[in-house]
Image: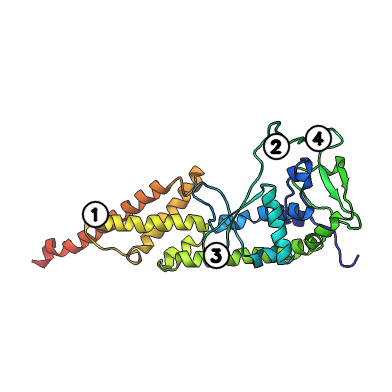
Amino acid sequence: MSNFKRITIQEFEQERFYKLYKFLFEDDYFRKLSDSAKIAYCMFRDRFELSKMNNWIDDNGNVYLIFTTKDLCELLNCGTQKVTKIKKELENFNLLEQERIGLNKPNKIYILEPKKPYKTNDSKEFRKSKFQNNENQNSRVLKVKKQKFRKSKSNDTEFNNTDYIETDDNDLNDLNDINNNISTTNNHSNHSNHQKNKFNNDALKFQVLEELPNQIKDYLSNFEIREIRIIKSILLKGKKSFNNTQDTYYRLEDVEFELVSVLKRFKAMLLQKNETVEAMQGYLMQSIKTELEEIHALNMRRQNMPKYNVFNE
């Protein structure tokens, strides 16, 4: 027991885990899916946060993943042949689609889910689909022979009133490729994934902010990458529009102090109104133009001041 310890409330609240989707285990159709494919499906869904960070969202608002075969082997901790088998199985059950991007580029991977409600009478794919809602069957979890799983926090699962499914030893053959390393993945990769995600996010931010002046760059680095892209676009469009209208030429470097003040007021407005950057784009554009107009007017007055100064006579 020296290698184990009790779990504190802080650790409990901060721990991360893979979400198991009930339809994979409760629906007669999806019960036929192998345990390896079910776990892979849940791990794929867990990677949506990375897709959000990388803006891997198509024109229809659908989230997709981009993985090389090597990436998938590392994620699922198995060989190429096993990865191919899992992907094919998920495709056969209409839970995964692949879209080709181009030559020598990894495919876009779309993870699918059945339309709610899952139970339908007409669908051939969901024939004899039942959800059991008896008092003694609030939820189901796998009871795997010869393996002990530590208790962990799970979404929408009542452990005080839970039925267990006996899993045949034969089913463990597929499951072992992934399940033997779930504990290691949760303990190791939670920290390493966090570091990797932060590293990737910092790299993306650096790329987007690279050409901006330092003060603006430093302040915008506090925003999410998606928000930074929007704000940067508005800054550049607002500056260009003003320069064209006034037939002048201001660089962001010339007005960065004033623009940082605009961005700080903009952030305060977002908090007060509880709005998103997307929803307040028009407000930000108008604020930038107004600030540039005031700066330009002040500069013009300064240029003309010597001409009308009585002491210059």
Q: Earlier in the sequence, mark 2 or mark 4?
A: 2
x, y percentage for residue 214?
Answer: 43, 68
Residue type beneath disc 1: Thr
Q: Point out the image quarter for the N terminus.
A: bottom right
* Residue 223 appearing in the image: no
Left/right placement of residue 122 relative to residue 63 reads right
The answer to whether mark 4 and mark 1 are in CB contact below 8 A is no
Q: Identify the residue position indicated by label 4 in the image.
A: 132
Q: Badge 3 local density, few (<14 within 10 Å), some, or many (20+)?
A: few
Q: Residue at x 81, y 58 (%)?
A: 174
Q: Residue at x 68, y 35 (%)?
A: 123
Q: Earlier in the sequence, mark 4 or mark 1?
A: 4
**Which numbered tag is attached to residue 105?**
3
Residue type beneath disc 2: Lys
The answer to whether mark 1 and mark 3 are in CB contact below 8 A is no
Above or below 280: residue 81:
below
